[in-house]
Amino acid sequence: MKYLIFTAMILMTSIASAFEYDLVSGDYRVTVTEKVKHTIRKIAWKGYTLATPTGYYGAIVMPAPGKYIGAGHKEGGTENVLSVTVTCDGKTVVPEAKMEIKGECITVEKISRFDRCLFRIRLVLTPEGLIETKRFIAEADQNFHLFYAHIYCFDKEMTDYFALKADGKTVRGRFEKKQKYDWHVNSEVKYVAEYNAGQKKGAMLYYPEIIPGTARKATIWEVLNGYNKCYMMAKVPKKVSAGWKSPTFTVILRGFEAENADGMPAAVEKEADAAAKIRIEPLPEPAVPDTQIPR
C-alpha cells in the first residue's frame, strides 16, 4: 500500500511540473532531475562541482546508429519511467522541487523501459561515495548498435586524467584543450579519474567488476567548451532474444584531493583501495511494477 501511495504521489507531482532535488551525504551533494527521468544532473564534493549539468547521465540504448534512447536523448525513442522509489536511511521520501534529502544512506531506484528492455537502476549515496548499479532484461527481441552503461559529465576545467587498465597498465595524460573534440583512455579499466589542478580536487570512477567494453570501451570525451565526459561503452550482443538478462553494471564515484598532478596517481590508488571495501547490495531483477507512471 505504501508503494502504491508513493507512486501515485510521484505521478501527481510530475504532472504538475518537472523539478530537481538534492541528495546530501557526508561531503557529497548529488542533484537529481525529475525532468530528465530521475537521473543525475550535478555532483559536488566538498563544495566543488565535479560533474556539471552540461550533458546527460544514466544509460543509453542505441538500437541502430544515431538512434539514442535514454535520459534527454530521444532520437531513437523515449525512456519510459514506470516507477521511482526514494529512501533516506530506510524511510520512504517523496521528492519535491528544491528539496534537500540528507542522510547516511540515500537511495533512488527506478524501473524504466528502454525500447524493448526493462531496466532496474539504483543510485546509492553515502559519505563513502556514490554507487550506480543497473541491469536489464529483454522483454522482446532487441537490437544493440551500442549500449552506454554509465555516463558522467565531468567539469571542463579538469586538467589531468589517470586510469588503471584491465591489463594492469596505467595511462596518464593532460587535457590539452587544443582542439574542439578529443578522446582519451579507450580501454577496459578498473578505474578512471579526472583531476583539476586549480581546485586540487578530482573524481574517480571505480569498477568493482571490470566491464567488458566495445567501440571506445571506457573513454573520456574531451569537449573543449562543454565537459570531459566519461562513457562506459559496455559489450552486449548485437541482438538479444526475449528473456535475455544482462549482467549487473556497477560503478562507484569518489572525490579525492591531491596537491598537484604528480600526486594524483597515489591519491587515486588510495581511493580505489577504499572503494574496493564498499559493500554493494545485490540489485534484484527488474520487474514491471503493479502501478505504473504513465509518460
Image: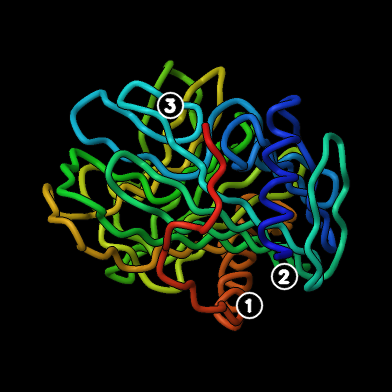
Amino acid bearing label 2 = Glu
Q: Specify whether 87 is left or right of 35.
A: right
> Considering depth in this image, is 5 or 187 the residue closer to the camera?
5
Q: Quadrant of the N terminus?
A: bottom right
Q: Which of 203 and 281 is in front in this view?
A: 281
- Amino acid type assigned to the residue bearing label 1 in the image: Ala
Q: In which quarter of the image is residue 188?
A: bottom left
Residue 181: mark: none
> How many numbered discs sit on the rendered protein?
3
The mark lying in front, picked from 1 and 2, is 2
Q: What residue type is labelled 3?
A: His
Q: Residue 73 carries which label?
A: 3
Pointers 1 and 2 in contact (CB under 8 A)?
A: yes
Q: List the residue tagged with mark 2.
A: 128
Q: Residue at point 52% right, 31% down?
A: 295
Q: x and y percent of residue 91 in the render?
A: 81, 68
Which circle's residue, 3 or 1, is located before the other in the chain?
3
- Residue 85 image-quadrant placement: bottom right
Label 1 crowd (10 A; few <14 / some 14-19 / many >=20): few
Other-residue count near label 3 (Cα within 10 Å), few / some / many at <14 / 14–19 / ≥20: some
Numbered tag placed on residue 274 in the rendering: 1
